[in-house]
Image: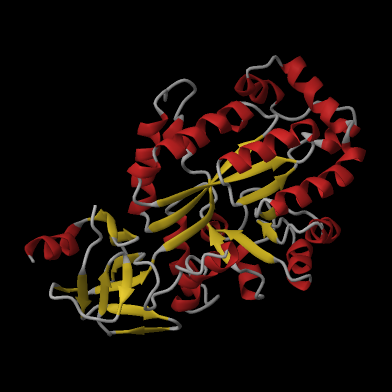
Amino acid sequence: MKPVELTLERGEVLLGPELTQEPLSLAGGLIVEQASKRRVDAFGFRILPGIVDIHGDGFERHLAPRRGAMTDMRAGLASAEADLASNGISTAIMAQFYSWEGGLRSPEFASKFLDALAHTRGEQLTDMRAQLRIETHMIDDYPKMLEMIAAHDIGYAVFNDHIPHKRLEEGRKPPRLTGTALKSGRSPEAHLALMKALHERRAEVPAALSEFAKRLHSQGCLLGSHDDRSAEGRVDFQAMGAHISEFPETREAAQAAHDTGGQIILGAPNVMRGGSHAGNVSALDLIRDGLCDALASDYHYPAMRQSVGKLVEQGACDFPTAWGFLSAGPARVLGLADRGSISTGLRADIVVEEIATGRIAATMSGGHFTYLQGDFAARLLAD
């Protein structure tokens, strides 16, 4: 499919830190200087850089809305792409677990998901990439994870630890044991036994994980940590090359990430709620204090664009800065120098927003419209 070639005129265009009314020309999948013969009136619309979602697992509900309900992952990925596009996302990092927790988080599901993503690559217009979320205590699976990351050219992995260590140390059963066991396909007894076995290996993890991180770096994989709780833990991850701190749970962890040169990813749903659903530190407060490099959809794609209005409304920052947390910021963290802002020579990744309502009228990824609706669609079709 040939990329769109056109010039958008009279719209508000976000160029760097300012909204201007300069025309914007697109050709060959790129932003170009030379005006096109085809001109479209964008008055009443705001033209913004495409959203780069650096971490999102909202695709899960498309692949498996209920246990056993989705058997064709290709259809699920097509549905997920439509969801991404309707929310202005032109680049999506799809966060897939590799975990002892089982179900959608199991190694088996990860393998199926990655295979499906690879097989549908030519069908997608949105740039959809995988991130692997690695459970740190699965030491025996590190070689399999390395193979998976290499086979699927995964460029970003993060370290998680979802084992309820405190409960296990106290000799108490973890909360919701029966429900989580059923999701994993195990009995509650077998699920608890697995958690205990992994918990008992905790002394082996630091050295093994450090060596594992070196191997991942040698494969060109960006590394991060997820849900950092303490400054000490964040410093340890930084030392092993995991420079990205996703959703730090405390101010101390976020500050440690900042002070050691790390990059901080916060959740857009946290911004919308005015705080974490789990009672962790407020993303709004961290943003006000300069402790944020990018926002991520986490579990809800619409929260990305909605968070911009919230940040402006709360006086946390101005509109260009807020939108930068969705575009230039995550692109910079991921090392994607070809996108994230509107500038000549960069990818034609844009979002067209209706100024009066704030609704997304169009999304473009690499010069291809992935979403189009309403009056803006009518103007394009009438041309």
| Apparent side of residue 157 relative to residue 236 in the rendered image (left or right) | left
> Which residue shows up at 83% across the image and 47% down it?
211
Residue in front for this viewpoint, 352 or 367: 367
Residue 139 horizontal/vertical position (percent): 80, 35
| Apparent side of residue 77 relative to residue 359 in the rendered image (left or right) | right
> Above or below — where is 22 with respect to 125?
below
Picture colour scheme: secondary structure
> Which residue shows up at 39% across the image and 50% down it?
84
> Which residue shows up at 77% across the image and 29% down it?
174
Residue 17: quarter of image:
bottom left
| Apparent side of residue 27 relative to residue 283 in the rendered image (left or right) | left
Residue 326 horizontal/vertical position (percent): 48, 65
Q: How many labels does the image show?
A: 0
Residue in front for this viewpoint, 102 or 35: 35
Residue 261 horizontal/vertical position (percent): 74, 71
- Residue sticking out furthest to the left: 382
Residue 140: quarter of image:
top right
Residue in front for this viewpoint, 3 or 326: 3
Q: Can residue 13 be seen in this view?
A: yes
| Apparent side of residue 263 relative to residue 78 in the rendered image (left or right) | right
Q: Is residue 226 visible?
A: no
Q: Quadrant of the C terminus?
A: bottom left
Residue 324 horizontal/vertical position (percent): 49, 72
